[in-house]
Image (cartoon, helix red, strand yellow):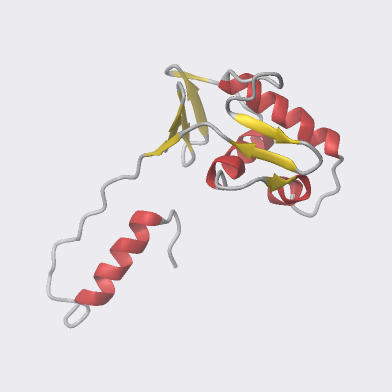
């Protein structure tokens, strides 16, 4: 769960809530918002966003612009203010709102003796699960 401004982005539920109410987003706009939030430490090039959201399908830059407008509308931002998503002219976009990440508490499962000698491996696995949504 990511919280920014008056919004909550619940990735597993695929929901954006603004002021407690679900803010409707098309699937590509939701995926675009997730990409921007998860890579908020840097500017994402337009081609990187197109590949990340649409994959290898050919879409025009206009599709990206339309989805950015949708994300801005859903989060209460606009192209003039840009307090959530900032356009970096000629390069791409960057998520600029301050984000608080809520991670569920991960606790060690009770031991039943089946992992004898695996305490270090189990501790490392718990650390990975706490910091990543997918561990294989």
* Residue 62, placed above or below residue 104: above
Q: Quadrant of residue 32?
A: top right
Front one among 45 and 117: 45
Expressed as whole percent of the image width and height from the top left, the position of residue 35 reads 60, 44
* Residue 118, placed above or below residue 15: below
At horizontal 69% and vertical 39% (from top left) the residue drawn is 93
* Residue 120, placed above or below residue 19: below
Q: Is residue 22 left or right of residue 113?
A: right
Expressed as whole percent of the image width and height from the top left, the position of residue 75 reads 57, 22
Q: Quadrant of residue 115?
A: bottom left
Expressed as whole percent of the image width and height from the top left, the position of residue 64 reads 77, 36
At horizontal 76% and vertical 46% (from top left) the residue drawn is 50
Front one among 50 and 77: 77
Front one among 74 and 79: 79
Expressed as whole percent of the image width and height from the top left, the position of residue 85 reads 63, 31
- Please identify the quadrant where the N terminus is shown: top left
At horizontal 30% and vertical 69% (from top left) the residue drawn is 124
At horizontal 47% and vertical 36% (from top left) the residue drawn is 13
């Amino acid at each position: 769960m990511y919280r920014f401004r008056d919004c909550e982005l619940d990735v597993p539920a695929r929901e954006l809530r603004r002021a407690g109410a679900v803010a409707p987003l098309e699937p590509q706009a939701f995926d675009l918002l997730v990409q921007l939030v998860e890579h908020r430490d840097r500017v994402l090039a337009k081609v990187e966003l197109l590949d990340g959201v649409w994959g290898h399908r050919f879409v025009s830059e206009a599709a990206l612009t339309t989805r950015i407008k949708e994300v801005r509308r859903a989060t209460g931002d606009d192209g003039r203010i840009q307090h959530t998503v900032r356009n970096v002219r000629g390069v791409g976009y960057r998520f600029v709102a301050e984000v608080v990440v809520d991670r569920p508490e991960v606790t060690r499962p009770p031991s039943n003796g089946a992992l004898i000698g695996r305490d270090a491996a189990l501790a490392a696995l718990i650390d990975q699960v706490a910091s990543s949504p997918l561990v294989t």
